[in-house]
Amino acid sequence: MTDLIDAPDATWTVTAEERREFMRAYRRWWVRQPSTWLGLCVAVGIIAGAAMVLDWHPVVAIAALLASVALIIGISVRRVRQVYPVGETFRSWAGATAYRLDGRGGGMEINWDRIAATNVGPIAVHLRTLSPKQNLLVARQVLGEQARARLDRGVDGRVVEPVAREDAPGERSVVVDRKLQIALCGAAVRRFRVAGWIVVAAAVLLVLLRIADGDLWPALGTAGGLTLALGVVIAATVLPTIGTYPIGSTISGSFGEYLVVRGPWGRTSIHRSKLTPVARTRYAIVFRSGAARVIVPRAILDEESVSPDVRAMRRSTHG
């Protein structure tokens, strides 16, 4: 923890009505995000390519597009519901150097110098953070008077190197180098390996079929579109990982009742019951937390505490 503060700045127990209001605000905010439209464009490109390859009827293509949109919306809504479950009590602190939010399921700590811009609304607060670059929408109730006053004063967007600190008891640390960063990015994109091979195989098959028909250029365009769509999806996964684990940064953490990870951006904690291990590579362990994935360097975790949870993943120990 960056600051030791006894009394929280705000305490909020989530009610069904307050969450419904936040969900309405979240949907309006979500529709305005460039990343939303980028995801929809990727979905359109993939479906258009599949329709051309498989010669779909227009009705089938439209149905597939609507289904993909519904899936994207459903995943986003599910994540928000998991963040603010009804009955959960949150406490927040506005410290001298960071904003801290904690609940039974975990918490986060964001250094003030990592917040690049804010927009405080009547129901929700939009935070744009640096390193990693993120757009976050949080319920206004989790920001107390001190935090809102600090945000109202504005931020200059400078990334300030954190002061040297010692690891907390039980924590281990590692300095991120290029090799470790590449390995963490590789762990992040492992989920796309099957889809990636399918897209590559479809693109190659399409080109070969069109060559046989003597109609190469349209096939190259479609294959390029499919490959570009896959590249955009992978980039959208890799860039946040690079921002979370920049080269030269010191990352520390522990895995007891909570998985705790600290970096130059602040601190993240997730209760053990909210985590499901899904993969383990030589340098990283991947957990699923609801609809999200959490990539953690193995070097900061005690293998004795982790191993009981990852025995079912022995096929994934290579890499």
Image (cartoon, rainbow, N blue to C red):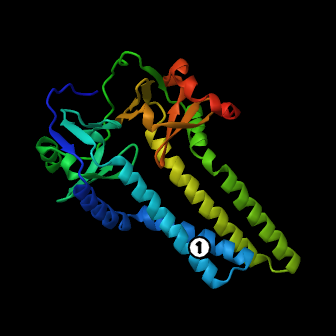
Q: Is residue 108 above or below residue 193?
A: above
Residue 221: give x, y in percent of width and height: 69, 73
Say which of 316 and 45 sits in front. Answer: 316
Residue at 67% across, 35% down: 316
Say which of 79 and 95 sits in front. Answer: 79
Amino acid type shown at disc 1? Ala
Q: Is 11 left, or right, of 61 in this rendering? A: left
Residue at 44% across, 43% down: 243
The quarter in which the C terminus is drawn is top right
How many numbered discs, if any? 1
Circle 1 crowding by C-alpha within 10 Å: few under 14, some 14–19, many from 20: some
Residue 292: give x, y in percent of width and height: 47, 47
Residue at 50% across, 30% down: 176
Regarding mark 1 in the picture, which secondary structure is present there?
A: helix
Q: Is 193 left, or right, of 162 in this rendering? A: right
The quarter in which the N terminus is drawn is top left
Residue position for label 1: 64
Q: Is 186 left, or right, of 106 in this rendering? A: right
Residue 145: give x, y in percent of width and height: 11, 44
